[in-house]
Image: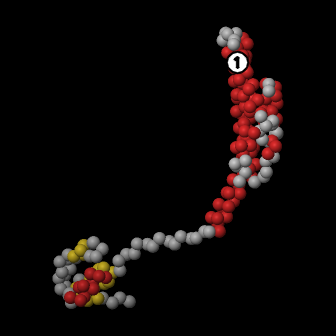
Amino acid sequence: MNYDELYKAWRQEKEEGDLKPLSKDFYSQVQLYINNLLEEINALDEKSVKWRLLNEEVNNVKKMVKDLTTIRNKKVLETTFRGAPVQSDAYTSAEEAIYTKMVPLPEEIKKLIRSVNENYVPQQKKKQKQKPKKTLVRFLQAIPPIVGMNMKTYGPFKAEDVASLPMENAEIFIKRGVAVKVETK
């Protein structure tokens, strides 16, 4: 591997739409290339022009590898999620180990969507809190204030007052003969 080969692979991947085949050991070759450059740099004086040039080459190689990998990943992801097959001969060994795990993803997503759509069970509306039923009564005698079954205070009432009370309270007054139910139409 050398700079020109890496540049050519990067440029093709950047300019062309489909995934370009790389050698199975592409990333290993790039790592070996970077290691060789770093060994050469370590043997040089930091003030030398060659040291600076090689250091810049290492930085450029790392940037190109990062960009190349990002472009390839994006292409594989887009192709995979469209459900189209990706040519596995275009993968490097390192990529193949990663990407083969992704192949079932689109089918799993379709299964999830089908499952949700086919097994949809509408939830029943939450029961609205029912207001206690009330009854209209007319008092036959005076009554001091009371606390109703709904914990609200009612009264005081004078004889002949008409009030709307919770059903349970109204029934007690009616049974005791203190009040009578008022019929409404």
Is residue 74 visible to us here? Answer: no
* Quarter of the image where the N terminus is located: top right
Work out whether 181 lies above or below 35. below
Q: Position of residue 130 (x, y in %)?
A: 39, 75
Q: Position of residue 123 (x, y in %)?
A: 53, 70
Way the structure is coloured: secondary structure
- Answer with the quarter of the image where residue 37 lies: top right
What residue lies at 76% left-to-right and 29% top-to-bottom?
29
Type of amino acid under label 1: Glu
- Answer with the quarter of the image where residue 62 lies: top right
Work out whether residue 4 or residue 157 is closer to the camera in this orientation and state it.
4
Query: What is the total number of numbered labels drawn onto the structure image?
Result: 1
Query: Does residue 141 appear left or right of residue 77 in this picture?
Result: left
Query: Does residue 59 appear left or right of residue 15 in this picture?
Result: left
What residue lies at 38% left-to-right and 89% top-to-bottom?
185
Q: Position of residue 79 (x, y in %)?
A: 76, 48
- Residue receiving disc 1: 39
What residue lies at 20% left-to-right and 75% top-to-bottom?
145
Is residue 126 visible to us here? Answer: yes
Work out whether residue 89 or residue 146 is closer to the camera in this orientation and state it.
89
Query: Does residue 172 appear left or right of residue 131 in this picture?
Result: left
Work out whether 159 lies above or below 154. below
Q: Secondary structure at mark 1?
A: helix
Query: Does residue 123 appear left or right of residue 105 in this picture?
Result: left
Work out whether 157 lies above or below 19. below
Work out whether residue 167 or residue 21 is closer to the camera in this orientation and state it.
21
Graded by Cα atoms within 10 Å as few (under 14), some (14 to 19) or many (20 or more), the crowding at tag 1 reads few
What residue lies at 20% left-to-right and 80% top-to-bottom?
157
Q: Position of residue 112 (x, y in %)?
A: 65, 60
